[in-house]
Image: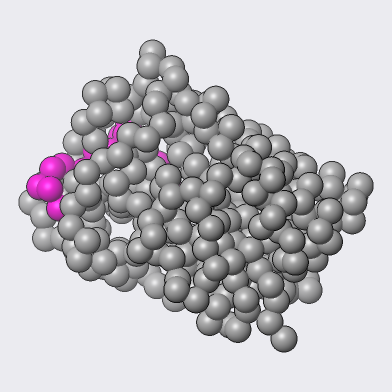
């Protein structure tokens, strides 16, 4: 029997994919988004959509009435920018979490699925496993750590069941390639479509595991229902590790571009080696990596070329300009 489900961030990249998957599985889905980083073109016609700001507690209370499961994906996920815009980013990310938690308890929500971030691990030795402490290196990661801790407190105090998902470096069709602060593969593709060089911070030897949206979506959808996932923290993402230089080379080759990377100074507080374990997600959520990085990038390029190049959108101002990357200050992304 289908559930009544609320997905926050339902017009965004990951949120819209999740809405589509939950509808496909036969659930009744409503979603909310302020459209600051999402687009109406991503919203399913089979979803009850509300444009709104989750910092409005009255709106949140109305949205949560009658809901069985909440999937909270809405966030401003610009980890690097958070070092220079901590007030705006944590206002967007923390207040909605508090509103949703209170509404969830007051309305008897069965399970709260929260998409956190690998950023909570900070600069610990990789691969990051779920048993590691929360040691974030930036305000974004600190905000996510706060939200995780609040879920644990609400479980103990109010018997609210949760699942914490820690995705990492998700990419694919519908990603906001106009965002100059996050989603490096999307930034590269967007620049190359305008015949501009891809930008690489530092020496490009940072290590990441990029995760294709389709596989991540399946696992996140399963988190609302899998009995073994109850009150667990679970990494979700690809086991395929590459350097930033290697990932950039794949994009250049798949786009048949003769451009070469433009290297700029490192970003402050960037963790150099960051990837996570996958065993728990495979066991509890059925995660499987079905796309290689090249296959996933090829799918994203095809989608992006259908959209055409996008003008970068500098939505949130830099609150601290001193020591910010020059390409951000000059708005030259």
Residue plotted at (39% across, 64% down): 42
221 shown above or below 137:
below
User: Hey, which quadrant is residue 57 in on the image?
Assistant: top right
Residue plotted at (19% across, 36% down): 262
189 shown above or below 31:
above
Task: Point out the image quarter for the N terminus.
Answer: bottom right
Task: Tell me if residue 211 is in the magenta stretch.
Answer: no
Question: Is residue 236 something one can see in this rendering?
Answer: no
Can you name the residue that lies furthest to the bottom here? 1
User: Hey, which quadrant is residue 111 in on the image?
Assistant: bottom right
In-front residue for pair 48/282: 48
Task: Point out the image quarter for the C terminus.
Answer: top left
The picture places residue 270, in percent across and down from the top left corner, at 46, 33
Question: Is residue 40 something one can see in this rendering?
Answer: yes
The picture places residue 16, in percent across and down from the top left corner, at 47, 64
Left or right: where does residue 186 sit relative to residue 273? Answer: left
The picture places residue 140, in percent across and down from the top left corner, at 56, 35
Left or right: where does residue 273 sit relative to residue 100? Answer: left
Q: Which residues are magenta?
A: 193-209
């Amino acid at each position: 029997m289908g559930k009544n489900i609320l997905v926050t961030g339902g017009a965004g990249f990951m949120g819209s994919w999740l809405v589509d998957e939950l509808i496909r599985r036969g659930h009744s889905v409503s979603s909310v988004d302020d459209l600051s980083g999402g687009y109406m073109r991503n919203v399913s016609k089979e979803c009850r959509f509300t444009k709104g700001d989750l910092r409005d507690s009255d709106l949140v209370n109305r949205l949560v009435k009658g809901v069985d499961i909440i999937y909270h994906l809405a966030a401003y996920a610009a980890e690097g920018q958070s070092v220079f815009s901590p007030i705006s980013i944590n206002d967007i990310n923390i207040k909605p979490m508090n509103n949703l938690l209170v509404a969830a308890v007051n309305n008897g929500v069965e399970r709260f699925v929260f998409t956190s971030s690998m950023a909570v691990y900070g600069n610990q030795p990789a691969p990051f496993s779920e048993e590691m402490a929360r040691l974030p290196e930036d305000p974004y990661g600190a905000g996510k750590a706060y939200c995780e801790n609040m879920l644990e407190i609400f479980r103990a105090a109010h018997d609210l069941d949760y699942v914490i998902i820690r995705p990492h470096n998700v990419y694919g069709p519908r990603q906001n390639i106009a965002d100059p602060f996050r989603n490096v593969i999307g930034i590269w593709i967007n620049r190359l479509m305008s015949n501009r060089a891809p930008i690489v911070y530092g020496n490009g030897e940072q290590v990441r595991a990029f995760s294709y949206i389709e596989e991540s979506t399946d696992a996140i959808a399963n988190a609302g229902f899998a009995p073994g996932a109850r009150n667990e923290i679970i990494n979700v993402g690809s086991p395929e590790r590459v350097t930033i230089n290697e990932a950039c080379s794949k994009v250049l080759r798949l786009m048949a571009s003769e451009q070469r990377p433009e290297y700029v100074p490192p970003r402050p507080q960037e963790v150099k080696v960051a990837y996570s374990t996958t065993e728990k997600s495979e066991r509890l959520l059925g995660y499987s990596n079905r796309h290689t990085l090249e296959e996933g990038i090829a799918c994203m390029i095809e989608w992006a070329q259908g959209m055409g190049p996008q003008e970068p959108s500098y939505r949130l101002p830099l609150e601290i300009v001193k020591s910010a990357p020059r390409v951000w200050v000059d708005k030259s992304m």
